[in-house]
């Protein structure tokens, strides 16, 4: 492929001064390609690297934490002494990069994991291009391939770090890597073309609702409405396809819950991360060890009912746990969850069908459905909350829905279409006054607009404002719109 055949699309650094990413478009095929550019080694640096790797293979277990780099730097010095080679600072830095990448990191795919824009890393077998899911460009083929030996070595490393054995007897591994990466691995016993690995990344610092407002995913008035609903016990279901940002939005909304509330979360792999002191995270357990039984989402939802949560959160409804979850909503718990579905209608069909089997009479208890998806905005892929609707009734005639907000493709804006029927019910029952609702929605919208304006987007800042707002809303509002944190 010549320079005439490609068009430069994007370029950025992953590790300053060491590793770059160059994204190009193949003019012939129209495909976007993701190229990792790593340091080039001089002949002497290559010799030092090869000898250092030999010494590493002969050494005992690597030290943990920050001691790894100290150990490797000492190893390089020892190698240079043995080989009687003197390297410059830049050459030593390059050798250090490869040693750290291949020992403490994940080898050739380590740059893909380090890239903040990649969300998934997909290895589809040996000697095949590794693919990434990029937040800007979606699926991209990389310039990285793994040989059979390299892939087998990566399988061993991942299984050790997850702490689970993988073998012909148990050829599937699911788990969480120490960095918080979710991994799905299958050996060639189930994949004829060789072992497959999918690594899904999650941010150490959660994306907040203010991040989402700044990025245009949701508008401040829509977020303020959801905040008010959460406080008043209105249940929510976030729907969308794979990679739409359902869990990210769920986590962002949980930050808006009163700080002292008791929140129970149930997940198959830990993704939710919130600062509430009464947060009780529960995780399902799949066991292959004789005498150690599985703990399913169904059982955890039943257990959660007995520990009296104010908010019951299920990371994703998939099976029979849905019925128990809806029973919990019927008994007065406020619930939040996500469902893999392309629309409200599709979500309801899934809830009604096996294995969920939720009775039609219970489904409207999931009061608000929030659809989030990936869309194309100005030629780039972006996430947007597409629709926020209240499900008022499910009958043989269909669904009775009140749409509150809808995304306009032409304007790239989330437009308010109607007032909330559920909040109107709260007013009729005397739980809140109309003036109070109007004032709260206006004030909370202004607080969120100001937080976005002044960059109060970190998890700590969002939780601090939320906590103070519940204590003294007027004073918090006044402080934030003046550009200060309370």
Image (cartoon, rainbow, N blue to C red):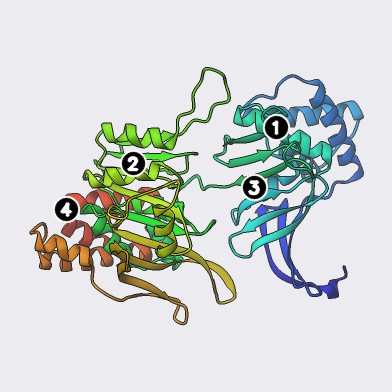
Q: Is residue 354 visible?
A: yes
Of marks 4 and 2, which one's residue comes earlier in the chain? 2
Which of the 4 image quarters holds residue 476? bottom left
- Residue beneath label 2, please? 324
* Closest to the observer, 414 or 12: 414
- Residue beneath label 1, please? 157
Which of the 4 image quarters holds residue 436? bottom left
Of marks 2 and 3, which one's residue comes earlier in the chain? 3
Callouts 1 and 2 close, C-beta under 8 Å: no
Structural crowding at the residue carrying mark 2, measured as other residues with C-alpha within 10 Å and reported as few (<14), some (14–19) or many (≥20): some
Q: CA distance from mark 1 to mark 2?
A: 38 Å
**Left-right relation of 232 to 250:** left
- Residue beneath label 3, please? 113
Q: Position of residue 366 (x, y in %)?
A: 31, 55
Give the mark toward the camera: 3 or 1: 1
Structural crowding at the residue carrying mark 3, measured as other residues with C-alpha within 10 Å and reported as few (<14), some (14–19) or many (≥20): many
* Res. 108 mark: none
Q: CA distance from mark 3 to mark 1?
A: 15 Å
Q: Is residue 458 visible?
A: no
Could you say whether the residue bearing mark 2 is in a helix, strand or loop? helix
**Residue drawn 71% across the image and 58% down it:** 21
Callouts 3 and 4 close, C-beta under 8 Å: no
**Left-right relation of 142 to 424:** right
Q: Position of residue 354 (x, y in %)?
A: 45, 48
Give the mark toward the camera: 2 or 3: 2
Q: CA distance from mark 4 to mark 1?
A: 51 Å
- Residue beneath label 4, please? 472
Q: Position of residue 276 (x, y in %)?
A: 32, 40
């Amino acid at each position: 492929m010549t320079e005439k055949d490609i068009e430069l699309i994007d370029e950025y650094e992953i590790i300053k001064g060491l590793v770059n990413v160059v994204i190009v478009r193949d003019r012939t095929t129209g495909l976007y390609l993701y190229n990792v550019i790593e340091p080039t080694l001089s002949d002497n640096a290559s010799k030092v690297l090869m000898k250092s790797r030999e010494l590493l293979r002969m050494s005992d277990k690597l030290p943990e934490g920050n001691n790894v780099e100290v150990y490797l730097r000492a190893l390089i010095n020892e190698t240079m002494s043995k080989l009687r080679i003197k390297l410059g600072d830049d050459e030593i830095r390059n050798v250090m990069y490869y040693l750290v990448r291949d020992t403490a990191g994940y080898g050739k795919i380590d740059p893909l994991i380090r890239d903040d824009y990649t969300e998934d890393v997909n290895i589809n077998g040996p000697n095949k291009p590794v693919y990434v899911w990029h937040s800007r460009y979606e699926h991209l083929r990389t310039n990285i391939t793994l040989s059979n030996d390299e892939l087998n070595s990566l399988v061993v490393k991942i299984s050790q770090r997850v702490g689970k054995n993988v073998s012909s007897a148990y050829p599937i591994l699911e788990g969480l890597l120490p960095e918080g990466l979710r991994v799905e691995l299958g050996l060639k016993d189930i994949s004829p073309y060789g072992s497959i690995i999918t690594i899904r990344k999650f941010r150490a610092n959660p994306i907040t609702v203010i991040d989402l407002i700044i990025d245009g995913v949701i508008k401040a008035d829509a977020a303020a409405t959801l905040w008010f609903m959460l406080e008043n016990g209105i249940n929510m279901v976030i729907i969308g396809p794979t990679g739409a940002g359902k869990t990210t939005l769920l986590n962002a909304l949980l930050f808006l819950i009163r700080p002292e509330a008791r929140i129970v979360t149930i997940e198959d792999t830990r993704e939710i991360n919130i600062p509430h002191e009464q947060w009780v995270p529960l995780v399902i357990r799949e066991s292959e060890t004789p005498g150690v039984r599985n703990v399913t989402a169904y059982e955890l939802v039943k257990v959660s009912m007995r520990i009296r949560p104010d908010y019951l959160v299920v990371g994703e409804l998939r099976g029979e746990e849905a019925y128990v979850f809806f029973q919990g909503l019927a008994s007065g718990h406020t619930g939040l969850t996500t469902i893999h579905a392309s629309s409200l209608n599709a979500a309801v069909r899934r809830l009604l069908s096996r294995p969920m089997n939720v009775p039609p009479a219970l489904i409207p208890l999931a009061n608000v459905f929030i659809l989030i998806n990936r869309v194309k905005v100005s030629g780039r892929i972006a996430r947007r909350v597409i629709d926020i609707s209240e499900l008022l009734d499910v009958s043989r005639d269909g669904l009775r829905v009140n749409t509150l907000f809808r995304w306009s493709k032409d304007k790239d804006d989330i437009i308010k279409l109607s007032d909330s029927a559920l909040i109107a019910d709260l007013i009729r029952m005397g739980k809140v006054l109309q003036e109070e609702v109007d004032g709260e929605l206006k004030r909370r919208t202004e607080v969120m607009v100001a937080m976005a304006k002044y960059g109060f987007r970190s998890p700590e800042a969002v939780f601090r404002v939320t906590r103070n707002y519940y204590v003294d809303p007027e004073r918090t509002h006044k402080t934030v719109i003046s550009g200060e944190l309370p």
